[in-house]
Amino acid sequence: MMENYEDYSDQRSLSLDDASSADESPHGIELSLESSVDATPYIGQRFVTHDAAYEFYSEFAKRCGFSIRRHRTEGKDGVGKGLTRRYFVCHRAGNTPIKASSESKPQRNRKSSRCGCQAYMRISKNMDSGVAEWRVTGFTNHHNHELLQPNQVRFLPAYRTISETDKNRIFMFAKTGISVQQMMRLMELEKCVEPGYLPFTEKDVRNLLQALKKIDQDDDSVDLLRMCRNIKDKDPNFRFEYTLDVNERLENIAWSYASSILSYDIFGDAVVFDTTHRLTSFDMPLGIWVGMNNYGTPCFFACVLLREENTRSFSWALKAFLGFMNGKPPRTILTDQNVSLKDAIEMEMPRTKHALCIWFIVAKFPSWFNAVLGERYNEWKNEFYRLYNMEMIEDFELGWGSMVNSFGLHTNRHISNLFALRMHWALPYLRDHFLAGMTTTGPSKSINAFIQRFLSAQTRLAHFVEQAAVAIDFKDQAGEQQIMQQNLQNILLKTGAPMEAHAASVLTPYAFCKLQDELVLAAHYASFMLEEGYFLVRHHTEMEGGHKVIWNSQQGNISCGCRQFEFSGILCRHALRVLSAMNCFQIPEPYLPIRWCRYYNTVPSKTLQGGLSDYSDQVQALQSMVSNLITESSKSKERLDLATEQVSVLLSRIREHPMSAQR
């Protein structure tokens, strides 16, 4: 609704200068071309243009603690005769009309700042002197709301401006991939202003980048697809999928590299699908599939950019991922808590166990519990981790109830939600599912560091796929160096047991160290045979309890109630204690998983057997075998001499072999 402001053309200002009148001679008053520090609007005040009047009133409003906006204009003798009257009002004037609700289009419930304030200034066009001028014919400074302090008024939208120089600076920062928060800190340092005192806010910068995205998105999307097609032309094993909306604009796109698909064939049993990030420059949700290889380093599987975060988009992303990976779903997928993603996983990966990443949950603890618990926060956090790592479901649930009582968290909604979702994150409920050790601190930090490097490859959208490939290649090279360093380390046997030496010769150093820790601890346990093939294993200091272990010597099968092998692929101390007591001198083959063995680095077994005939696949397989050759040969001078001799012979034979024109 339009507010009515009475015509005070023949009245004096109600609250300001009584000596000013609209009837005063135009020749006795100078036109107001500038404002003084304490200048106040008054009836009869004159301006050369209506824009000059607006600027004057805006400066006055800023000093008083409010901002203004243009309200309405009027013409003389009907439409088409030119503008003759203009109203400027307080930014809180008027009332927001109620929008009609629509079932098909949900409304955004924003709280309006408008409260019907009647403060205003009206100017009218006057031609009495033969020269067009604008005269103040109405003014009141009565507000029905509190006025802001000088340190607050600058946050009003009317006074938040980004100059062209600052815009160019922001665009330059955006190309480097730094966050908006970092941009603000840099510009504060450059301008020598205190934090928070720039003439614009982080929200303004985000809006500016979003506007840039809308301007460039169509062209950039075309460039992105062209970039993917170019990569595909160079590498036929590069895979990508995309969708277009009804306007033929890019909606979603997913891609994976040839090396990632090969890695997934072995290490895709447990996958993290991280959807907690956005592509900063274009404010697009970003999803990254990551796993853990046999040397404990992260491996990239695929990436997706989505326009929306809903079930339909996530469902498409999961279908694209499965298509890249030849229809092979992971055994376990770990994600952040997201209802839409949960629904999509249930539809597209019904046989995959869906778990929640503990590090995504723990990252939210400070904001959830710091203020609530105060000095007891760290004490509560330690108790949470104790419960999280328990083996038995019954012990967890009893402990959780005690924790809630001890810390007075009965009504805390975050605690209630965590307990409702306990089957998706608490280890007692997940020990039957393989998670590749990605619930511990070390791997989670390593994966997060890799993702941060991946995210730093942000300039234009079209370059993201290419720069991400560079980031992944850098990570692969760093991983190869770590593998080389691990393999060159002298393995120190701690128990002298034949099983330890056997494991050291088969497992990667990363996996062996975990098994070795269990072997060392196994010596602290006693085993009691309850009946043929059934054992009770208990710590030597305990008189009750223990873990039940079942050992089938004929079939070579062993299982323990703690379920550590099912969970991590590493035998537990209880099972190792029984094997030792039963005079086993080697780890049974089923308990040396291929994914933790030395000779399964990035090449699937079918590749090593020549199962893949594709030229590019064979080249990558050869590269991996050469890397393994160097690793194994460098362990002793004798091995190095043998490898040098044999490779020299092989190289001579290859050079003599005729080359085919076809690949």
Image: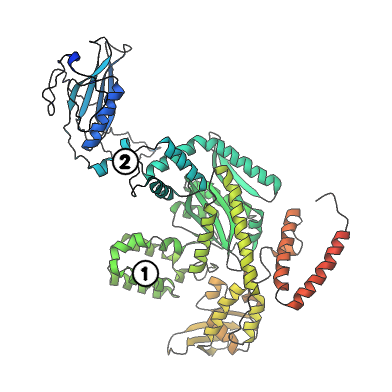
State which quarter of the image contains the N terminus. Answer: top left
| Image: 193 above or below 123 | below
Q: Residue at x 49, y 34 (%)?
A: 215
Q: Quadrant of residue 359?
A: bottom left
Q: Nearer the viewer, residue 514 or 656?
A: 656
**What scheme was used to colour the molecule?**
rainbow
Q: Identify residue type, mark 2.
A: Arg
Location of mark 1 (residue): 381
Residue 217 placement, left or right of 41: right
| Image: 85 above or below 641 | above
CB of mark 2 within 8 Å of CB of mark 1? no
Q: Identify residue type, mark 1.
A: Lys
Rendering coords of residue 237 (x, y %): 69, 51
**Mark carried by residue 657:** none
Q: Nearer the viewer, residue 214 or 138?
A: 138
Q: Secondary structure at mark 1?
A: helix
Residue 496 placement, left or right of 12: right
| Image: 289 above or below 70 | below
Rendering coords of residue 217 (x, y %): 52, 37
Q: CA distance from mark 2 to mark 1?
A: 37 Å
The reply to whether residue 533 is visible in this rendering is no
| Image: 84 above or below 522 | above
Residue 461 placement, left or right of 587: left
**Mark carried by residue 110:** 2
Rendering coords of residue 251 (x, y %): 53, 41
Q: Nearer the viewer, residue 311 or 380?
A: 380
Closer to the chain start, of discs 2 and 1, is: 2
